[in-house]
Amino acid sequence: MDNMRSKKYYFKFQARGYELDSYGHVNNAVYLNYTEQSRWQIFNELGLLDQFMASGLKIVVIENHVKYIRQIKLFDEVEIETQMEKSAHFLLFKHVLSNTKTKKTLSKVMVKTVFLDENDKACDIPESLLETFTEA
């Protein structure tokens, strides 16, 4: 199961006014919140979020790398393309945030996560999630 192809998921949202910085741009820290929402939405759409919560599993971010390219501006419509990959015992998310109108990339984010069991010990990626990947 190590040679599994990732899948791409899409999440659309609109930047909100209360998140503006002093320059009138959406605060860059908000990017991280949007990528977090995207990951949870993916688990929810796959029907796995309730299952993870019921079994006591937690998903913890252990690395987060962000490359800012452009600012999100007030009322920009933004799309996140998320590629979910399995890498050893880790689940990687590669997010590309882009303006839906101009199609310009706003940022690229790579997030490395690990699953913890009910005792907060690292555990394997749940089999139900591995089934969402396609064979290479």
Image (cartoon, rainbow, N blue to C red):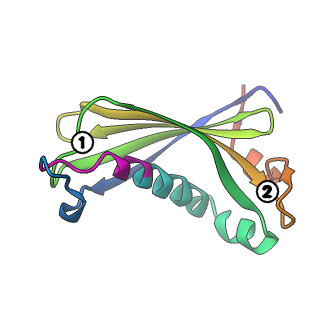
Q: Which mark is residue 7?
A: none
C-beta proximity under 8 Å, tags 1 and 2: no
Residue appearing at x 72%, y 61% in the figure: 58
| Pick the front one: 29 or 13 | 29
Residue 80 on the magenta segment: no
Disc 1 from disc 2: Cα separation: 35 Å
Q: Residue at x 16, y 55 (%)?
A: 75
Q: Residue at x 30, y 37 (%)?
A: 98
Q: Could you tell whether 133 is left or right of 80 in the image? A: right
The number of discs equals: 2
Q: Which residues are magenta?
A: 24-32
Mark 1 or 2, closer to the camera: 2
Q: Is residue 19 left or right of residue 55?
A: left
Given the image, on which type of amino acid does mark 1 rest?
Thr
Instruction: Find disc 1 in the rendering and name its residue.
Output: 100
For label 2, the residue is 116
Q: Residue 116: name its quadrant.
A: bottom right
- Indicate the amino acid at tag 2: Leu
Q: Position of residue 99 (x, y in %)?
A: 24, 40
- Single out the residue that lies furthest toward the front: 22
